[in-house]
Image (spheres, rainbow, N blue to C red):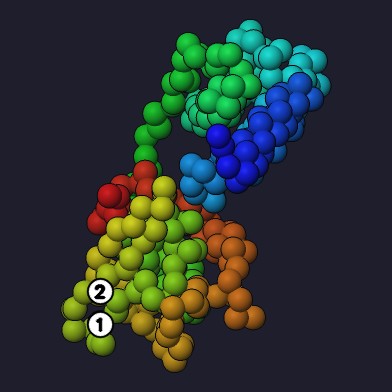
Amino acid sequence: MPSASEARDTSAAQASSSQLAAEAANGLWACLSDYECTYMALRNFAEATRRGYGSDLRLFIGYLDEVVGIETVKAVERTGLRAYFAELDRRGLAGATRARKLAAIRSFFSYLESAGLAPASPVAGIPRPKQEVRQPRVLTELDYASLRAACQNHRRDRAIIELFLQTGLRLSEVAALRLCDLELPMNPEDGRIGAVRVTGKGRKQRTVTLNWKACQALGTYLDGRCTGEGPPVFLARAGRPSTRCYRRLAGRTGGLWPAASSPSRALPPRARP
């Protein structure tokens, strides 16, 4: 005979199951809320994945609700999904963007199926959109010189540009750097190298070598800065982390800077894992 504690646990599980069933009956929006609150945490999705999937799914459910007239999980069929992706194609969305949206929808219905809220996933059988292959832009020596000249009087921006040029790190990776991630030599001018610990996509960490040019630019910028675990490497003038500085830097470098910060560009040395 079950104990009082086991009986309470069983009752709570039944109540939770009833709540989920009610959410399926009430609509897709309620299921999306539970997906974001529980399933994403259970899968330990990265913060960027949570934001991207949540945004994609809100647009998808909004389309089903407002255009197709579908409000519940059981009413979603493959024809509705095909119509949605056909609409995305008409809007001119790139194949990579549509592939990401398909991954978000596939994850959402995987959750619904595992929770018993959908008998089968309507996403099964829908092919992944092909992604366009674009010729990467290779920076020339003149481009290198122009980038350095555009920020020669600003130590922070010079350090950002030099870090991009010498490593090819992603913008999000550079923006997330902390002082504790850097290992700089005492005197970079003697040719010694350093290293930086980078947290990339999927929270995977890797160590990237810093040559003397990157070490020198970073050392000049950080001269006099306190070290510690928490402080970000790159700060705004007010001493706070800021992403606006990257947008201003893009404008000041005449469009060359986005190429320097893209991992798909041919920048020596490459910093891809």
* Observer-nearest of 177 and 120: 120
Residue 33 coordinates in the image, percent (x, y)? 70, 38
Mark 2, residues whose alpha carbon is within 10 Å: few (<14), some, or many (≥20)?
some
Residue 17 versus residue 173 in the image, above or below: above
Q: Earlier in the sequence, mark 2 or mark 1?
A: 1
Q: What residue is shown at x 25% (from left), y 56% (from top)?
A: 269
Look at the image and tell me whether residue 56 can be seen.
yes
For the residues bearing labels 2 and 1, Cβ distance under 8 angstroms: yes
To which residue does mark 1 refer? 185
To which residue does mark 2 refer? 194
Residue 197 versus residue 133 in the image, above or below: below
Residue 217 coordinates in the image, percent (x, y)? 37, 77
Give the distance between the C-alpha atoms of the residues marked 2 and 1, in whole angstroms.
6 Å
Residue 102 coordinates in the image, percent (x, y)? 54, 25
- Considering every residue shown, the one lying at the far front of the view is 1
Helix, strand or loop at disc 1?
Answer: loop
Looking at the rendered structure, the number of numbered marks drawn on it comes to 2
Q: What residue is shown at x 54% (from left), y 51% (from top)?
A: 47
Residue 191 versus residue 242 in the image, above or below: below
- Considering every residue shown, the one lying at the far left of the view is 191
| Kind of residue indicated by mark 2 | Gly
| Kind of residue indicated by mark 1 | Pro
